[in-house]
Image (cartoon, rainbow, N blue to C red):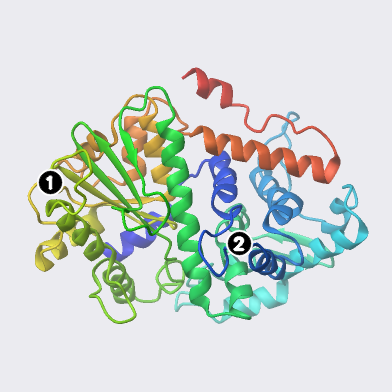
Amino acid sequence: MTADLFRLGRYNRSPDPLRELGRASLVFERTPPRPPLSDSAAWQALQRTAFEGFSISEYLERFGVLIFMMSRGWGVPDQEGGLDTPMVLANEWLAQTLLGPEERQRIVGIFRGMSMTRAQAQARLQETLRPDGLPHSPSLFVSYPFVEVQPDVLVPSSPTMVSEHLRGGLWRRLLDACKATRPAEVWHSAFGDMMEMACREVALDAQAAPRFRDRVVLSKSIGDADEIEDVVIHGSTGLALFSAKASRIEHAVARGALSRHRVLQWIHAFLFAAKSKRHRGGALRLLDAKVDRIRAGAWPNVPWPADVPVFPALVSFDDIGDGIGIVRMIEQRCAEFGLLQQPGVAPVALLSLDDLEGLLALATRGRSIPELLALKASPARREQPFKSFLLDESDSKHLRLPVLKQRAKDLFERSVKTLFNQAAPVLDPDEDDDERA
């Protein structure tokens, strides 16, 4: 049951499009802070290898925002009641932009790299058929979200598979480009730093809000000796420790899982693996060690006592299918291994980066982060999925931080300016209503 709910929980979500767009900019439009990719020339070279000669910003302006906005419109009624057809005529559409012939052909090449012919898709799906005659998983379309049904006529497998390109697609292209000249670990390490920087940025953005009640505690830079945890938030009722984990959920565990046992193996390795020469240990072992150091007074200059109530949280780049199954399993394993069992330590909260943004946005409305995590850890709410918890505690359908709204707005405006030399229309018609709320 745990394995099944873990997988299903990753599909059962309705992400906020504005935050998705802003998050792509927040995470990927930054330079890694540590060598070797902190070198501007090295970082630029990697980007241009990954994105057909474009930088990430150029790629998003010319292609990423384009397909993201297209995917949001497919099947949506227009003012006349008609539906936007999910069909892409790449050459015809790009001819309407201000891009030159060379850039247009490079973007057509990108479309083709994300596409298969109908015959290719049929053959690949045939290989995955189960005894009941249905494909095991649509994961084929993660890498190839478009099907070329006629020459130069592309049809998406689903809007979600296309919009996923702003997350997994960018990450995969940069990984593949890195592996051409360096060990894969160079990109994994750099991306981990980029995600941590994104977490730090949203935390500081929330702290700037007039109604934010807590204090954000950060080291001067990533990996400093004074770093307690990636993001620490101190409130009157305790200390929230947020550990950012950029590890991607493996394909064989997520959409393409063939074995429930394999799913549970991945969860165990991610959370509980023992320390080795090549591995620092599972995420909860690392958090447990941080709590021990806090209890031992390892940071004498911090403004809280050693026995301060602690609310540990993991923040992952991917959505983790939290809820009743995995929560019970984690509590049992933590008790078995003696992890996070110190007095005054709450059960760990599992968040995606999207959830962290929502939690911080809720805090800008006068709620305390440690108080919210204490409520989430209560017996009545402990097994509730985190997204559901946030919605129950919010008075608005949107939980948006200013930094994400601004990044989405800036990226959208840059794209419209680049493609059409026009001022961008209002990105989200609900934004004013949300502000009043």
- Judged from this view, the residue extending furthest toward the front is 301
| Residue denoted by label 1 | 306
Q: Residue furthest left?
A: 343
Q: Position of residue 124 (x, y in %)?
A: 61, 78
Which residue type carries mark 1?
Ala
Q: Looking at this view, is 78 or 93 the one in front? A: 93
Question: Which numbered disc, 2 or 1, marks the residue that appears first in the sequence?
Answer: 2
**381, above or below 154, in the image:** above
Badge 1 local density, few (<14 within 10 Å), some, or many (20+)? some
Q: Which mark is residue 170?
A: 2
Mark 2 belongs to which amino acid? Leu
In the image, residue 305 sits, relative to residue 432, either above or below, namely below
Residue 96 in the image, given as x and y percentages of width and height: 89, 47
Q: Is residue 292 something one can see in this rendering? A: yes
Q: Secondary structure at mark 1?
A: loop
Q: Position of residue 323 (x, y in %)?
A: 28, 52
Q: Residue at x 58, y 66 (%)?
A: 37
Residue 257 vertical placement versus 21 (above, below): below
